[in-house]
Image (tube, rainbow, N blue to C red):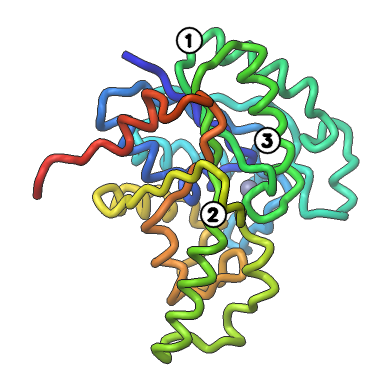
Amino acid sequence: MPTAVFVHPHPDDEAIFSGGAMRRAADRGWRVVLVLATSGEEGTMPDWVTVDAADHRRMETAEAAAHLGVDELHYLGYRDSGMAGSEANRTVGALAASITAAAADLAELLRSVGADALVGQDPNGTYGHPDHVAVHHIGLDAAERAGVGELLEVTLDRRWLRELRRDRIERGRLDPAAWCAVELERLGIDDPDAALVRLDVDAELSAKQAAMAAHASQVPDAADFMGIPPGTFHLVVRHEWYLRRLPASGPGPLEQALLRPGPAG
Ligand SMILES: [Zn+2]
């Protein structure tokens, strides 16, 4: 059974950015290993959470992982670096300040699970968070050290998002002020030459949404996410985008398995 490793910075990123692909890979005969670099210690916690943030988020992740068909869940044990410019960026053990060590840890894990494919983060860190940018470098480095032949990176297609925003505004479904264009321009990548793979995860949407709902402390129903208002965010979640880094020759086995048409109906 081939093994796909998905590495994300914080609990909830796996569900939001790659939940559909994880569920599909599991359904199509892949062993799915989830690696979280931190426990999301710096996440804002709602009042109803009375235990330690990291403990609570690990609990949420275990539930999300079950919805996504995860066979193994690992933590690299680094600290959440917080938003760009925050004090937490420089805390001892912060992920953003531990890239070399974390890459060595991940490489060891990739070897021990026999990874055939790795899914990491795009160079922009999806929305610019320092830990997401750190995981981009960690994934690249670890894949090379461990000799993993397929590397995909989660991203968002900024061109597609621009088009979505324009369309929603034209149809009168979106107040232009509700989804600020400046915020949108910070998301994902805009590179016409990139090998961008788009997945429609409609078939996996209920599992993906259940996994997102498991992260109730971080993904409230009615809030903006990455600046995208709730009425529009659900349209984004139905799609996932992956940047192909390896192999250079074209789609690898994981990508082929994800893009294969599913059973009819
Ligand atoms: Zn994150």
Residue depicted at 33% across the width and 52% down the height:
200
Whether residue 117 can be seen here: yes
Quadrant in which residue 63 is drawn: top left
Residue 114's mark?
1
Badge 2 amino acid: Leu
Marks 1 and 2, Cα distance to the nearest angstrom? 28 Å
- Mark 1 vs mark 2: in front: 2
Residue 156's mark?
2
Position of 135 relative to 127 (above/below): above
Task: Specify few, some or many for label 2: CA neighbours under 10 Å numbering under 14, 14-19, or 20 or more.
Answer: many
Whether label 1 lies within 8 Å of ligand 1 gets the answer no
Q: Secondary structure at mark 3?
A: helix
Q: Are marks 2 and 3 in contact (CB under 8 Å)?
A: no
Tag 3 residue: 135
Of callouts 1 and 2, which one flags the residue occurring earlier in the amino acid sequence? 1
Task: Specify few, some or many for label 1: CA neighbours under 10 Å numbering under 14, 14-19, or 20 or more.
Answer: some
Q: Position of residue 262 (x, y in %)?
A: 19, 40
Of callouts 2 and 3, which one flags the residue occurring earlier in the amino acid sequence? 3
The N terminus, quarter of image: top left
- Mark 2 vs mark 3: in front: 2
Position of 76 relative to 194 (above/below): above
Marks 1 and 3, Cα distance to the nearest angstrom? 20 Å
Badge 3 amino acid: Val
